[in-house]
Amino acid sequence: MYVVFLSGCGVAATLMLKSSPELHVPSNQFRQPISFFEEKPVFSVGFAKRSITPDLSKGGVWLAGFFPSRTGWLIHDELFAKCLVIRGKNNVSVGIVSTDLLGFLPSDIQEIEKRVSGFFHGKLLVHTTHTHSAPDVMGLWGFNLFGLPLFSGREEEYVHFVKNQIAACVKEADEKKEPAVIAFGETRLEGVARIRAGAEIDDMLSVMHVRLENRSLFLVNFAVHPNLLYSSYITADLLQYTYDYIEKETGGEVLYVNGAIGAVHPQQSGNIRNRWGRAKELGTMIGRATLEATQSAKISTSDSLFFKTALIRTPLKNKQFIKAMRWGLMRDERQPDGTMVVEVNYVIIGDGGILTYSGEVFPNIALALKKNVLQQYKFTFGLTNGGIGYILTSEDFHSGRYRYHTRVSVSPVIGDQIFDAITEMLASPDTAPESAPK
């Protein structure tokens, strides 16, 4: 059973969603592969989470993704902002926030950074999992009549609430830091994600297992669109079942970060009419693979913590985005010269190397750059510190194979620009972080 809010009358009701499967029953078979007391902690780590579930007592919300004019009237599962703050022996800190939303605009990230600047002095990475069943915080999916957008789907009150929750989450995690042992694991996971024939896909699931004195934290990095559940329910989609499985099996907390999801969607074999059942099946598969990778995880032999940032100016050529900005549907992200500033990062946490992209990066770009990461365990963080649409090479952009994706990309050259910027960062990883846009 699920408690939902019927926004039409503003009262709580208990409904049975017949198509939604029961949540996971723990097997109690998980055994911690890392003993906190047998290892010497070299990092300090804090964790916190805050609900970002919208209040539907005053009405429904516009849902992001698929197409405009979709409304969410019911709560299926809570949406969260989850934060992991990690500090190294060199006193460098990195904060990783995962939110159950479709995407943030770069200016929203800048405002979040300002809100935490008074108490958090490190690199903040704000990720959106890209669920298509959460409120529209970008503005592109509001009311649309016969193809004409009439008003934005972005509710500023809700966006303000989310930013405050993220800031509070970062503050709590930073204040709760304690000695931690970090281990890394990985495994290939097939049967969950798909891409068009002939295209590359990144099927590596990577895990950062943080062992505190009294509990475990799991940062899970895989690549698949969480867009199975097309309905009027607010939900984290298939990831709700990933969270539920890992949390019940381990008693720990889960922070999920999506990877190279450009053109990568859930496998739809089997009875796709039962989308909720399929969501549970795939989400559980991710959960199981996470624990399998954790069982063979290796404790980090390095205590390094380092980050490097590059800001890229890319020409905004997307006519739909430009119109949406002019009509006030979404924030105007353009610089005076007509460009947008896009952020990428290279982060080192012990034996793990992380590359971040502020959009839905295509796997061929991410896989090529992963090969140049020197750390043993390699992570791809898509949709981090911005959600600017698809990131594909200029060759793919002009190939005619990805017509939909080119309509949701800011520029034909963005993929090439990002590839060059990250390549440069990887070639000189020990230099000071950059701040000037390229």
Image (cartoon, grey):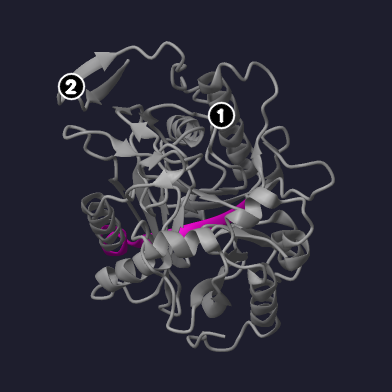
Q: State whether residue 96 is above or below residue 102.
A: below
**Residue 95 position within the rendered picture, expressed as x and y whole percent measured from the top left:** 40, 65
Say the numbered circle drawn on residue 423. Answer: none
**Residue 71 position within the rendered picture, expressed as x and y whole percent measured from the top left:** 35, 33
Q: To which residue does mark 2 refer?
A: 12
Which element is circle 1 on? Answer: helix
Mark sitting earlier along the chain (2/1): 2
**Is 6 colored magenta in this rendering?**
no
Q: Residue at x 27, y 61 (%)?
A: 167
Q: State whether residue 91 is above or below residue 61.
A: below
For the residue pair 31 and 258, the one nearer the viewer reads as 258
Say the numbered circle drawn on residue 284. Answer: 1
Magenta residues, as a range? 172-185
**Residue 327 position within the rendered picture, expressed as x and y whole percent measured from the top left:** 36, 60
| Residue 385 appears in the picture as rendered | no
Q: Disc 1 residue type?
A: Thr
